[in-house]
Image (cartoon, helix red, strand yellow):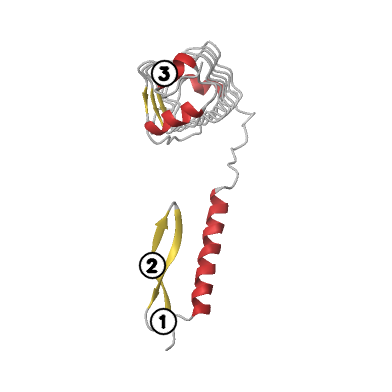
Amino acid sequence: MSLKMQRSASTVKRAGRSAMAVRCQAGRPSMPALAAAVATGVAASLLSANMAMAEFRLPPIDKTDPNRCDRGYVGNTIGQANAVSDKILDMRLCSYAGKDLHGRVLAGALLADADLSNTNLQEAVLTKAYAVKANFEGADMTNAVVDRVDFTNANLKRVKFINTVVTGASFAGADLEGSVWEDALIGSQDVGKLCENPTLTGESRAQVGCRAVRK
C-alpha cells in the first residue's frame, strides 16, 4: 500500500527543541522511508541545537551618548520583572565605584566590565542583568533581588548578599572569596552552582548551605 505522510500543524516540543510531528494515514512505512524520516528529524534537531548555541552578541556601545553611564543612577522604571524597557540600560565599562545605587531597578542592565566595587546596591533589582566580568568587590547587595543574573567571571569578593533573593543566576568562574550570604534566600539549583565554585570557602559555604565546608 502507498504511504501518505502528513505534517501536523502542531509541534512537539522536547527539551527546548521543536520537531514537526509526522502522522501516518495508511499502511506501514517501508524501512528506507522510515530511515529517511528519522535522518531528517535528527538533522533538524542538530540544526536547532547549533542555532541555540550560537554566540551571544551584545549591541555595540554607543560612545556618542554622553548620558549612557548616568542612566545607571536612575535605572529602569518599567517592566522590572521581565527586564522590558523602552531603552537598553547599557552600563558597560562605566564606573560606579563607591556610589549609591540603593533601590535602583537595574533589570536587563548590561553590566559587563563595569566597576561596581564598594557600591551600595541594597534593595536593588538586578533581574536578567548581564554582569560578565563586572567588578562588584566589596559591594553591598543586602535585601537585593538577584534574578537570572549572569555573573560569569565576575569579581564578587566580599560582596554582601545578606537576605538577598538569588534565583537562576550564573556564577561560573566568578570569584566569591569572602562573600557573605547570611539569611540569603537561594534557589536549590543556585546552591548547587555556588557550592561547585572553588572560591566559595569557609563560612561562606556554610551560609550558602553547602554540605562540605572547604577551609
Residue drawn at x 44%, y 80% as measured from the top left: 29
Residue on which disc 1 sits: 28
Q: As displayed, is residue 214 above or below residue 51?
A: above
- State the image coordinates of residue 151 (x, y, percent, origin top left): 52, 28
- State the image coordinates of residue 47 (x, y, percent, origin top left): 56, 58
The foreground one among 88 and 174 is 174
Lower sequence index among marks 1 and 2: 2
Report the amino acid beneath label 3: Ala
Report the amino acid beneath label 2: Ala
Q: Secondary structure at mark 3?
A: helix
Lower sequence index among marks 1 and 3: 1
The answer to whether marks 1 and 2 mark residues whose Cβ atoms lie closer than 8 Å is no
The foreground one among 134 and 3 is 3
Give the CA distance from mark 1 to mark 3: 60 Å
Crowd tier of the residue under label 3, counting other residues whose Cα lies within 10 Å: few below 14, some 14–19, many 20 or above: some
Closer to viewer: mark 1 or mark 2: 1
Lower sequence index among marks 2 and 3: 2
Give the CA distance from mark 1 to mark 2: 22 Å
Report the amino acid beneath label 1: Arg
- State the image coordinates of residue 194 (x, y, percent, origin top left): 47, 27
Residue on which disc 2 sits: 9
Crowd tier of the residue under label 2, counting other residues whose Cα lies within 10 Å: few below 14, some 14–19, many 20 or above: few
Question: Residue 206: which numbered mark, if any?
Answer: 3
Closer to viewer: mark 1 or mark 3: 3
- State the image coordinates of residue 68 (x, y, percent, origin top left): 56, 25
The answer to whether marks 1 and 3 mark residues whose Cβ atoms lie closer than 8 Å is no
Q: Secondary structure at mark 2?
A: strand
Closer to viewer: mark 2 or mark 3: 3
Q: Secondary structure at mark 1?
A: loop
Give the CA distance from mark 2 to mark 3: 52 Å
> Can you tell which quarter of the image residue 191 is in?
top left
